[in-house]
Amino acid sequence: MKYIRGGITAAKGFEAAACAAGIKYQNRDDMALIYSTEPCKAAGTFTTNVVKAAPVQWDRQIVEHSPYAQAVVINSGIANACTGRPGMDCCRAEAEAASQALSIPASSVLVASTGVIGMQMPVEKAEAGIRQMAQTKSPSEEAALAAAKAIMTTDTVYKQVAAEVTIGGRTVTIGGMCKGSGMIHPNMCTMLGFVTTDVNISKEMLQKAVSASVDDTFNMISVDGDTSTNDTLLVLANGLAGNEEIRQEDDDYRLFCQALVEINTYLARKMAGDGEGATALIETKVIHAASVKDAKILAKSVICSSLTKAAVFGHDANFGRILCALGYSGADFDPENVDLYFQSVSGQIHIYGNGVACDYSEEEATRILSDPEVTILVDMHMGDAQATAWGCDLSYDYVKINADYRS
């Protein structure tokens, strides 16, 4: 697979736009549009939170029952969650506005929202924004970048990616963008994420690939332990690459799955490293576990530990917090048979083994933990399974950001 320039518009037939609709923010773009010139197979995964935002409910119906999708309308600033019947009416109004502006069925329009929970959407502003974006949409890199920036809330950086892979003798392109900084916790996909591709694939196989991909990517990140009401991953495939349609789990399907996992891993890491107030990406890699299930449980327990996250923020090699998180994870193991290491671009240090602390340099450990990306390597010495999870450190700024988020 080869990474290329661009994002959500990199694949053939996809266009994007952004505009400043004034949904909540002022003097910045706060709406984005993704559009395909051809109808798309659509797949998605959504929040497991019992409290589901109106756009999540709308999109699940479209993905499950509509024959195809062709556009996605996204806004930032207001989540359209806990908004009752007016929230669903807003989704319908947005879809109908896009239908009229783009000359496509309302049943082919997906919607997504991110921001403050409980506020009602200014429907007229959203409709006006949709009409404006329908006129300015473009397949350009600039349009993709504008869309990626427009969906940001407390994100400090935009997140987009694109890559090419050869499938069935044809060049298939996959592009994506996402937003996510806080209220991020594994339990589906934990953010708003959008992936476009020109691969020719059946709806059944696309959904199967998408559902499988989140297990090792978006489900393996956590920023703060909160699963959002709006978590959504949407994948659109318009078939313009011209490969023979993927209808079964053959080599072409496996190639597409591998590429999709890489794209989603890239985006997931970007989100984890951009946690609210974060100064470092924390990667926890568990190796030689008894099972993949145990490896995932152990890795996620470490990156979800507030004490471990705070220790990394303080550049403190407090391995006891890591062992504590491993111990309450629910996986069974012998703590005297575990080895712990810290890794970064500055090097690797062995901090715990054979049930006791290793003879390591605190200064060297601090130097490693001061880098913007830190890996906690956990060797269980129990089997051949492994898993990786991603999170971020816990800084003073996290509390500051979330203490006055509504204002």
Image (cartoon, helix red, strand yellow):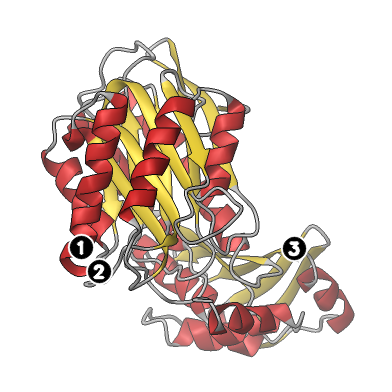
Q: Residue drawn at (26%, 66%), measured in percent from left and top?
A: 48
Which residue type does callout 2 highlight?
A: Thr
Q: Residues within 10 Å of mark 1 (few under 14, many from 20)?
A: some
Which residue type does callout 3 highlight?
A: Pro
Q: Which element type, helix, strand or loop, lies under badge 3?
A: loop
Disc number lying in front (3 or 2): 2
Up the image or down, 76 lies above or below 183; here it is above
Q: Which element type, helix, strand or loop, lies under badge 2?
A: loop
Q: Residues within 10 Å of mark 2 (few under 14, many from 20)?
A: some
Contact between labelled residues 1 and 2, with CB atoms less than 8 Å apart:
yes
Q: Earlier in the sequence, mark 3 or mark 2?
A: 2
140, 254: nearer the viewer: 140
Residue at image mark 3: 372
Residue at image mark 2: 83
Residue 337, horizontal then vertical, whole percent: 55, 79
Q: Is residue 364 visible?
A: yes
Up the image or down, 73 lies above or below 202; here it is below
Q: Earlier in the sequence, mark 1 or mark 3?
A: 1
Which residue type does callout 1 highlight?
A: Pro
3, 7: nearer the viewer: 7
Q: Which element type, helix, strand or loop, lies under badge 1?
A: helix
Q: Marks 2 and 1, how far apart in space?
A: 6 Å
Which quadrant holds the C terminus? bottom right
Residue 95, horizontal then vertical, whole percent: 24, 41
